[in-house]
Image: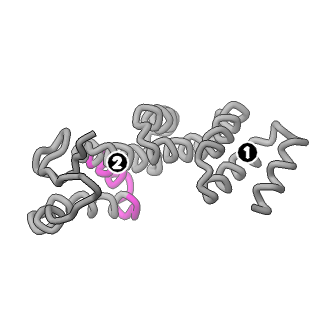
Amino acid sequence: DDAITFLEKFLAQVPSASQARAELANQYTGAKRLADAVNELRKSIQLDENNPNNFLTLGKLYSWQDKTDEAVKLYQTVLDRDPENLAALTGLGNTYRFAGLNVKAMGYYRRALEIDPDYADALESVRRIEEMSAPQARLKYAFLRVDDAEPVVGDRDDPGLLHLETGE
């Protein structure tokens, strides 16, 4: 809270400080104030369109909020400028994985691993998808209940993977 207060006061005096806005967004994220974080990142991007970290962070926040299209646009902006940006490739993979599009997600993780075979974030994400694809994982997760969700084998683009469907 002290950092948030300090940054808010600083930005009231120096509203054009894009890095301070990005740091305030990080502080808001840590405080679970995601709407405030999104607003600060948008302002930071307006002030500095050349900082890929702002696009990556905002993409991650949108991905967490199931705003897939918005997240994809931000990650793609970074990739248009830097086609080998590992964080953007992995961010796109995560966005698609969170949306239940595991085959598409794997494509982005594999692209990241082609660039850097030891890239930990991509390796971990591939491991998670492969674990969920294994027959023993399907059996294990078939017995889980999340509220009124029912486990279903298959996803939107790979009928062999497990996901949960709710009645919504």
Label 2 environment density (alpha carbons within 10 Å; few <14, some 14–19, many ≥20):
some
Determine the main secondary structure of the stretch shown in magenta.
helix
In the picture, the quarter occupied by the C terminus is top left
Q: Quadrant of the N terminus?
A: bottom right
12 horizontally vs 71: left or right = right
* Disc sitting over residue 168 in the figure: none
Query: Which is more toward the observer, 24 or 148?
Result: 148
Q: Give x and y (percent) for residue 58.
A: 55, 42
User: Most extreme residue toward the right, as rendered?
Assistant: 13
Nearer the observer, 3 or 164: 164
- Number of residues whose C-alpha sits closer than 10 Å to that of mark 1, classed few (under 14), some (14–19) or many (20 or more): many
Q: Which amino acid type is shown beneath numbered disc 2?
A: Phe
The residue at 23%/42% (across/down) is 167
Where is residue 33 shown, x and y percent of the image?
Answer: 62, 50
The label on residue 98 is 2
Asked if the magenta segment contains residue 46, the reply would be no
The disc, 2 or 1, on the residue closer to the chain's N-terminal end is 1
For image coordinates 15% across by 68% down, the residue present is 140
Residue contact at pointers 2 and 1, CB within 8 angstroms: no
Q: Position of residue 166 (x, y in %)?
A: 24, 46
The answer for how far apart the CA atoms under marks 2 and 1 are is: 27 Å
Q: In what element is the residue under mark 2? A: helix
- The residue segment tinted magenta is 106-121
Q: Which residue is mark 1?
A: 21
At x 18%, y 52%, the residue is 150
Q: Position of residue 67 (x, y in %)?
A: 44, 37
